[in-house]
Structure formats: structure tokens, C-alpha cells
Image: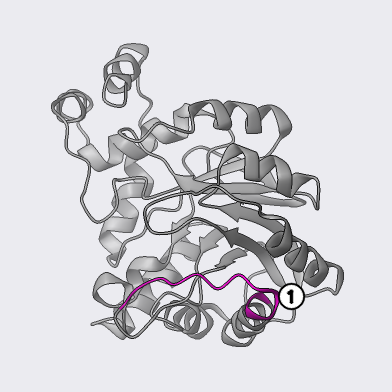
Amino acid sequence: MPGGTWILGDRQVTRFGYGAMQLAGPWVVGPPADHDGALAVLRAAVQAGITHIDTSDAYGPRVTNELIRQALHPYPAQLLIATKVGAERDARGGWPTARRPGDLRRQVQENLQALGVETLDLVNMRMGDATGPGPGSIAEAFTTLAQLQQEGLIHHLGVSNVTAEQVAEARTIAPVVCVQNMYNLAVRHDDDLIDDLAREGIAYVPFFPLGGFTPLQSEALSAVAQRVGATPMVVALSWLLQRSPNVLLIPGTKSVAHLRENITGTATVLSEADLAELDTIGR
């Protein structure tokens, strides 16, 4: 598997994982157009050796977790399923926050039920909003998750869409095994945080590694891709794998063929000259 593995808490996972968000309908609302195809992608990911799947009960809502359960339950012992809480979906497809203790307890129970497990492998506490991280304390919300962890409902804890200060605050409450923020070739605000986390043995999981709903586009990216004989998206993922050993990827796709292309393609090793050229994109 490209990039090898990383110890996430007490679990060894592949650095190349799979993000399930795209399996829901358009704009992450409703069921997939191809239900059987969605199940096939999940099964293909596990068959390919991927041991890290990222999801949330807010995707759909309540779509991707049900698909994961249908496709993979009972789960392989080596598979880690990460979910997140702290935001829900409204009737217009928005992402209103839901971070009060009662909200978080309910969301954890909903994830447990949908996935069909007694303990969630990893729960990320999502902060901020759709525009990115915001200021404020994470203490009340993260303390609630720490209590649920002590009750045996959660194995590991992470944080998502957070500032460096919120990461530090969360770590005073309970161990943090991963940070999940937006980061890619063009969005480099977390460079220092990634390096700090690597020194502490904490994983960094970039969401929207390919730019999100608007894919990355860059002359430098296209030039490097042509030179190494890969697609621009594969190069962008390869760059992330070479960025730091604590970076774990969760790219999503609805296509088995695309999944396999990404897995195979990101075995490409970028040269120092390639990396230097790509680094100009986000500077």
C-alpha cells in the first residue's frame, strides 16, 4: 500500500485510506445513485488492503454509515473506522453545529447504531464551520467525548477543523491521536502544525486533499504530472504522502477503477525537483 503504515493510537493503519463522504448523493445529501456500486467500492477498498475508512453519520445524513455496515459488517479485525461528531444536516443541506453534551451523546449513539458496533474506533470532534476553523474553547465538547471514551463507547479521540490552540487544549483533556483539517497543495496553513504533530507521534489527516468540490488546478501540478506520467490528482496525493510520515490520506471516490488508479498511482515517488516545483503552488 502506498506510503506504508502509521500507528494510530494503538492501531496500525495504512497511510492510504478511504473517505466515504462521496458515497452519499450530490452535495453529500441523500442516497447514492448506484447503491450496489457504492457497496462495491467499499469492498474493493478493504480487499486492496486499506485499513482506515473515514465517515460520519451526517453524510447523507445517515447514508454512508449504513452503506459501510451493509458492505463490510462484520468488520475485519484490522479495519479502523473513523467518524466525526459536532455538526448535523438541516433540510436545506446545511451543516449546523451540534456540540452541546446532549447533542454529542446522541450523535455517538447514532453512529454506534448505524455502524452496528458497541465501541467506535475513533471519533473526531469537529469544530469551526463550513468556512474553516474558528476561535473558541473546545473544552466542553471534548470533555464530553472523553467521558464517553471512559464509558467504553469510544476507543480513540481526534479533532477536526481546528486551530493549533484547540489541538493543544484538547490534549490537556484526553489523548488526541489525530487532527483532521483541510490541507492540500494549495492550502498550506497547517504546515507548522503538521511538523509539530509528527514530532509528537500524532497523525494528520487532510480532508479535501484534492481541493474539495473544486478540484486542484495548477500549471505546476500539470507539468509535474506530465513529467512523471501520472494524473494531476495522483501527483497531489503522492505529494501529501511525501509531505510527512504522519500524514494519512482519505481520498474518496465512487468508482472502483478510480480507487485502484489512485492506489497504484500514488506509489510514484516524486523527485526533489518535482517536490520543489509543487511547493510553489501553496507559497
Closer to the camera in the image, 74 or 244:
244
Residue 188's place in the image compared with 108, above or below, is above
Expressed as whole percent of the image width and height from the top left, the position of residue 17 reads 49, 53
Residue 77's place in the image compared with 168, above or below, is below
**What secondary structure prevails in the magenta region?**
loop
Q: In which quarter of the image is the C terminus?
A: top left
Does residue 102 belong to the magenta stretch? yes
Which residue type does callout 1 highlight? Thr
Q: In this view, does 42 lie to the left or right of 230?
A: right
Residues shaded magenta: 93-104
Expressed as whole percent of the image width and height from the top left, the position of residue 60 reads 38, 80
Residue highlighted by disc 1 = 119
Expressed as whole percent of the image width and height from the top left, the position of residue 164 reads 60, 37
Does residue 35 belong to the magenta stretch? no
Q: In this view, does 168 lie to the left or right of 84?
A: right
Residue at 72% of width from left, 56% of height from top? 139
Label 1: element kind: loop
